[in-house]
């Protein structure tokens, strides 16, 4: 058995059975070994940023890592933007990156690069295999490291001769380390602060955005009067179906500052202390009010859900309404609130959101890279059926289409709805080809405002000035306008265009009822 086959068998034994791949010459023995390890689902992509983003989406939904297969340093570099997003999402992910054969590296061939240095920028763990006999064990170690704690991206560099040499030995899975619990005295310390009656804010994120965490956080907020907020871009957020819906921290710093105004203490549970996304002239970067202490309950790498449940008990919280054990428990389909009516008339951001809220199916996975055009969608879907929301965790655009692809591979029995800004879509539009090839149930709505609208806002916010016309042309997507119907068709995905809210609702209803991928270009009114 060669090293490549031993590595594949070790990954599968450790529960990694999907690999999003864009291989090259150095990885051909890994590719060939796929015929001998049919348990590994190999998903080809046309760009490494699709592979890394898809592995991120898979991990968010499955709760376990997928692998990527990348070609040398340039391949890794092509995938780095979405590895940045995956790092910020704190998901488990295993990169397998081919390298030149060990004996060839001294020649400094054209594709030789500082792969180790590049991997360090996004990886929580990295290793370069040196022998076929050891690469199986290296793979098992990589999976274990991706789980942590604290976990994250594990990058295994595999020289070509390590793959092709004989003597490979599959390795058994490593034991999973349980998440550490928050010390009892920390829980009691935070409980004492919240019981004091001082105005407080509880900011949650990470694993606290699942059903158990949300219910526990709501119990704490109800019992103590604390304001409940959640992070702006959650990794995966359980929503609808009667679940608690905490208010999100605003993207714009001054709005976030206003949300925290009056708080005398800020408690963090799975979230970082809030800061502005960018620096602005004359505006603070730290959004926490002056004199407001920050009290961390649970950070990365610990069991934040258990900590919130212990905190709820420590503050004497009863069961929250709508929780499994509380009044009205069981959680209805809409939490007692109505969905939006089916919209008609002009296609605006508001009527687009109403169409999504009206038609969102039970159990859907919503991938949100709508940027400015989707600001109305969270409110329109909050009281709909149970669904999961995947956001732009790292802020690097080009994530939506790949994450939707990986989510659909992880959950083939659920419909994925991708809300995609037109400018962002062009970063990784190759994802559509993978969706078509794999027959994935992904419906994409491209929100076509023909501009980088977020940057138009930012141009003014940072105080930049110019002659007007030339600056505006840098942020405009006309001349020529992007034609997503033709682009999607060229990549194998059926596509249509909506100019009105009525057309969008009709097309969306049809696409959600049809197997396989589809795309709707929603041309928004100016």
Image: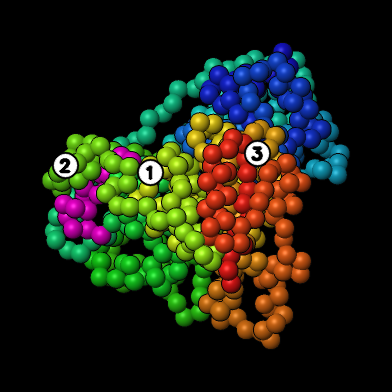
Nearer-the-camera pick, 430 or 194: 430
Give the percent coordinates (x, y) of residue 248.
38, 58
Determine which of the numbered discs, if any, sits on residue 435 in the image: 3
Q: Which residue is mark 2?
A: 327
Nearer-the-camera pick, 274 or 99: 274
Mark 2 is surrounded, within 10 Å at the Cα level, by few (under 14), some (14 to 19) or many (20 or more) other residues, namely few
Residue 57, can we see it? no
Determine which of the numbered discs, if any, sits on residue 385 in the image: 1
Q: CA distance from mark 2 to mark 3?
A: 43 Å
Q: Is residue 214 magenta?
A: yes
Identified at 73% across, 25% down, the residue is: 30
Determine which of the numbered discs, if any, sits on residue 224 in the image: none
* First to last magenta residue range: 211-227
Give the percent coordinates (x, y) of residue 168.
69, 16
Main secondary structure found in the magenta portion: helix
Identified at 61% across, 57% down, the residue is: 498
Nearer-the-camera pick, 514 or 188: 514
Name the mark nearer the viewer: 1 or 3: 1
């Amino acid at each position: 058995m060669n090293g490549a086959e031993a590595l594949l068998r070790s990954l599968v034994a450790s529960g990694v059975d999907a690999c999003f791949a864009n291989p090259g010459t150095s990885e051909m023995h890994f590719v060939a070994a796929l015929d001998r390890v049919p348990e590994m689902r190999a998903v080809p992509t046309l760009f490494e940023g699709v592979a890394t983003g898809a592995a991120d989406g898979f991990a968010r939904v499955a709760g376990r890592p997928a692998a990527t297969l990348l070609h040398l340093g340039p391949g890794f570099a092509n995938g780095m933007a979405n590895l940045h997003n995956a790092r910020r999402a704190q998901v488990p992910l295993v990169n397998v990156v081919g390298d030149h054969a060990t004996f060839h590296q001294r020649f400094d061939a054209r594709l030789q690069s500082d792969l180790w240095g590049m991997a360090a920028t996004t990886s929580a763990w990295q290793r370069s295999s040196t022998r076929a006999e050891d690469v199986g064990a290296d793979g098992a170690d990589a999976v274990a490291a991706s789980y942590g704690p604290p976990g994250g991206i594990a990058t295994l560099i595999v020289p070509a001769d390590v793959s092709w040499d004989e003597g490979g030995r599959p390795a058994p899975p490593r034991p999973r380390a349980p998440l550490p619990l928050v010390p009892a005295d920390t829980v009691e310390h935070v409980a004492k602060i919240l019981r004091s009656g001082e105005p407080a804010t509880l900011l949650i994120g990470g694993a606290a955005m699942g059903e158990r965490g949300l219910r526990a956080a709501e119990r704490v907020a109800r019992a103590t009067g604390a304001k409940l907020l959640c992070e702006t871009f959650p990794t995966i957020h359980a929503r609808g179906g009667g679940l608690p819906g905490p208010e999100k921290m605003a993207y714009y710093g001054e709005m976030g500052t206003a949300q925290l105004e009056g708080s005398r203490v800020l408690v963090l549970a799975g979230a970082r202390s809030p800061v502005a996304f960018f620096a602005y002239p004359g505006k603070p970067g730290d959004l926490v009010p002056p004199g407001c202490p920050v009290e961390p309950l649970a950070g990365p790498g610990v069991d934040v859900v258990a900590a919130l449940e212990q905190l709820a008990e420590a503050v004497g919280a009863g069961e929250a309404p709508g929780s499994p054990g509380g009044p009205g428990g069981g959680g209805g389909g809409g939490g007692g609130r109505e969905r939006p009516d089916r919209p008609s008339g002009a296609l605006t951001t508001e009527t687009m959101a109403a169409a999504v809220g009206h038609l969102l199916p039970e159990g859907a996975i919503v991938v949100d890279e709508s940027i400015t055009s989707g600001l109305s969608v969270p409110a329109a879907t909050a009281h709909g059926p149970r669904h999961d929301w995947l956001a732009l965790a790292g802020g690097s655009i080009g994530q939506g289409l790949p994450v939707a692809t990986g989510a659909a591979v992880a959950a083939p029995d659920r419909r994925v709805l991708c809300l995609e800004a037109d400018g962002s879509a062009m970063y990784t539009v190759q994802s559509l080809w993978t969706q078509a090839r794999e027959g994935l149930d992904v419906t994409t709505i491209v929100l076509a405002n023909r501009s980088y609208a977020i940057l138009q806002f930012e141009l003014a916010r940072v105080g930049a000035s110019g002659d007007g016309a030339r600056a505006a042309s840098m942020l405009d997507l006309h001349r020529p306008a992007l034609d997503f119907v033709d682009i999607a068709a060229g990549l194998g995905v059926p596509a249509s265009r909506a100019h009105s809210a009525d057309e969008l609702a009709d097309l969306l209803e049809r696409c959600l009822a049809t197997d396989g991928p589809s795309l709707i270009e929603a041309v928004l009114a100016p």
